[in-house]
Amino acid sequence: MRHAAIEFRSERYLRIDGNPVADHRDRIVGLYRCGDGRWVRLHTNLPHHCAGTLKLLRCDYDRGAVQRSLEGWQAFALEDAAAQTGLVITATRSFDEWDQHPQGRAVAGLPPFAIERIGDAAPRPLSAGGRPLAGVRVLDLTRIIAGPVCGRTLAAHGADVLLVTAAHLPSMKPLVIDNGRGKLATFIDLRDVSGRAQLAALLRDADVFVQGYRPGAIGRYGFSPQEVARLRPGIVYVSICAYGHEGPWADRRGFDSLVQNANGLNVAEAEAAGSDQPKPLPAQALDHATGFLMAFATMSALKHRATQGGSWHVRCSLAQTGQWVRGLGRIQGLQCPDPSFDEVRDRLEDSASGFGRLTSVRHSALMSETPPCWTRPSVPLGTHSPGWPT
């Protein structure tokens, strides 16, 4: 349990050549109070979200200027205005407020994840090999934490994972390094016909297709669950989004910090700590938990495919995970010290990487005959050509 908790904070313990990796947080990201007295959280870590937020608020790139602008806004109005322009801002809510919200009610009716059959195909047993997922080929079209943790976990059990992104897409270097362990990494631009043809060619030899775009976005390029199942019968298609595939927020963008701000977790943490300001969880728990749930559900779907045949769709979301985490109950942990780098050193490993000597958290699963490990180093995005290993 201690090791798993440490892995939920893996990005915090990352070191390159013995040095911490530079903080990826933007200078105006975080909590602010609006003119109606309610709190909002801004996510501006990606350049286009930062620029869009400043444009919406009509202010300079400065925390003081942002606060002055927000004094003229009401929290819920700002939340909606941001969503309408594709930005990522949420108003802080309590559990009761989230439970009464239409999206809260929609998520309450969903399981932590779903596995649905979406097509027919003959059974396809897993390959014989020395590791549980030997021979399984995974296309990983995800960024940030949740989706990449899924691919990283599958790689730890022997899958060949090919991370697919594009040169024009923003990224956060510490998360690329931490979550790139065990993966190949290539560039494919889906805006181009040739890029879409490359991905379709890779798909024909894939077992798993993981994508983290908001619902419907990747379908515009011809890679919806149904189209992918048609191109590759027997595929396990894995979708991750912020707020679930049902409800009025199904199409909204979001990140862990925004979901736990909207769904009541930050208010509950603040109340427990006696704080008058929303308090985040001590880890990106929704991200990491969702990534592991995605990997677990993917393995379950591969078993379904091996025994029953068919193509399968795995659906996960940060909001569904948040609902599940909330249902697990709470402990009195406010007196628990924040583990330092030296205090977790027994759970770290050193390895070569494309960025320098990497110190990172080992995978926390323990298996006697097939111990999880990463056989490929973390490398810069776009390092490899778009192809499967031979």
Image (tube, helix red, strand yellow):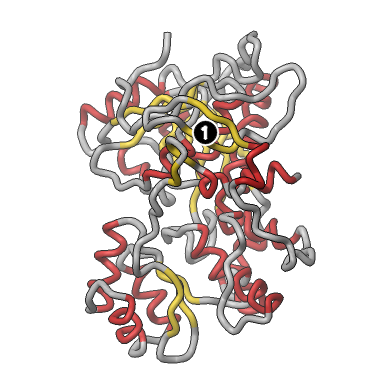
Q: Which of 88 and 364 is in front in this view?
A: 364
Residue drawn at x 53%, y 33% is 152
With 133 as the anchor, is 215 left or right in this view?
left
How many numbered discs?
A: 1
Q: In this view, does 328 lie to the left or right of 46?
A: right
Image spot of residue 359 (x, y percent):
52, 35
Q: Where is residue 190 in the image (x, y as percent from the top left)?
A: 27, 36
Q: In this view, does 24 lie above or below 183?
A: below
In the rendered view, does 373 fall on the left or right side of 253? right
- Amino acid type, callout 1: Gly
Above or below, comparing residue 342 to residue 247 in the picture = above
Quadrant where the N terminus lies? top right
Assign a secondary structure to mark 1: helix
Kindly indicate the quadrant of the structure image that contains residue 285: bottom right
Q: Where residue 361 sits in the image (x, y, percent)?
A: 59, 38
Question: Where, by quadrant of the figure, is residue 205 drawn?
Answer: top left
Taking the spot 57% from the left edge, 43% from the top edge, the residue there is 291
When the figure is inspected, residue 273 is found, relative to residue 375, above or below; the finding is below
| Residue 113 seen in this snapshot | yes
Which residue is pictured at 49% across the width and 46% down the height?
145
Give the side of residue 141 with respect to residue 98, left or right. Answer: left
Residue under pointer 1: 151
Q: Which of 285 and 222 is in front in this view?
A: 285
Tell me if mark 1 has few (under 14), some (14-19) or many (20+) residues whose alpha carbon lies within 10 angstroms of its own: many
Q: Which residue is drawn at 38% across and 29% down?
A: 379
- How far across and how far down the image is residue 62, in percent? 28, 75
The quarter of the picture where the C terminus appears is: top left
